[in-house]
Image (cartoon, rainbow, N blue to C red):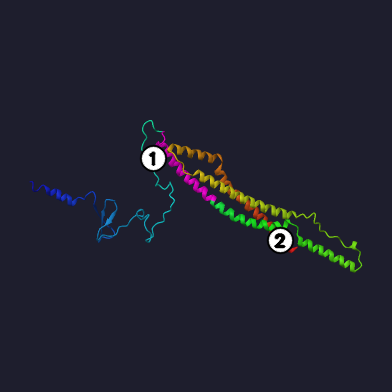
Amino acid sequence: MSNQEPAPFANTSRDEPSQENHVAVEMDHTDTFHDSVTEDTSQGRPIPKHGSLPLHRNKKDNEGGHFFGIPPYQSPYQSPYTGTRTYNYTEKYAPDPFGEEFKENARVWKVYLDEAENYDDEMLRGFKDTIDSLLIFAALFSAVVTTFAVATVDSLQPDYSQITATLLLEQIKLLRAAGNVTEIKAIPPSSVDLNNVIPSKNDLWINGLFFASLSLSLATALLSVLVKQWLQAYSSISSGNAKERAVIRQFRFSGLEKWKVPEIIGTLPLILHASLALFFSQLQSLHFQCTWGAFS
């Protein structure tokens, strides 16, 4: 009996699979000549044996793989809403001893700092992208408006070339009158009055609104730089324990709301749009004036 007892154990070791390696035989109903034999490893991923057909993998297995040998693009920015963030803070931080739930390094302050950090990252990233775009556009637009404003300043000054031509014409008339024995009183006096040279109202409007557009554009750039400095001070690293850093962050956030910084950032594009509207309106008036002067 002692010699025959190990036989059942030997048979079971051959017939029954182990916990690490499991062999499953699947019959393909469409093809009766081939069998699909797979072997499960310790990671739970099926591996085809030699001589078996290749298995059709699911889409989930192909996600994140290489596409024609090219690794997938991984953005440096990782959103906290993609599932990689740990929301279970009971596992992330050890529980506090009884009676020390509000100490300097208690779990509640660490949880607050984690939540505040994710919120501030999203908020500051949106603010900084908006301000950078406004700064670039305001700088380029201010350069264009300055060119037109300087060009229209000459229209506010007396046209000395026109005055010279008018005086020369009057002098020629006087010389002709003297040669023809014509009375000097018959020659009409010149309309030039150097003491009362006033530009036209149209020139004043065009130049004034060009400077108004330039002022709004520069004001947008100035406020953008100030807001950028405020955000830099807001995101600066504070020292101290978890409770002190949480209090400092809340103090900064309260100041950000008290000084209406989000409202100011939302108003900056409106100021720049108003500047752009003034520029286009005066550009159209200037074009109409040049066209009317050419045909008149």
Per the image, the residue denoted by label 1 is 89
Few, some or many C-alpha atoms within 10 Å of disc 1 (few <14, some 14-19, many ≥20)? some
**How many callouts does the rendering have?**
2
Residue 281's disc number:
none
User: Depth check: 266 or 153 in front?
Assistant: 153
Please say if 232 is above or below 191.
Answer: above
- The span shown in magenta is 102-131
Q: Relative to residue 106, is residue 257 drawn left or right?
A: right
- Label 1 sits on a secondary structure element that is helix
- Is 189 contained in the magenta span? no
Per the image, the residue denoted by label 2 is 290
In the rendering, at what x and y percent does residue 89 appear?
38, 40
Main structural element of the magenta stretch: helix, strand or loop? helix
In the rendering, at what x and y percent does residue 27 appear?
26, 56
User: Depth check: 44 or 38 in front?
Assistant: 44
- Label 2 sits on a secondary structure element that is helix
In the rendering, at what x and y percent does residue 155 appear?
72, 57
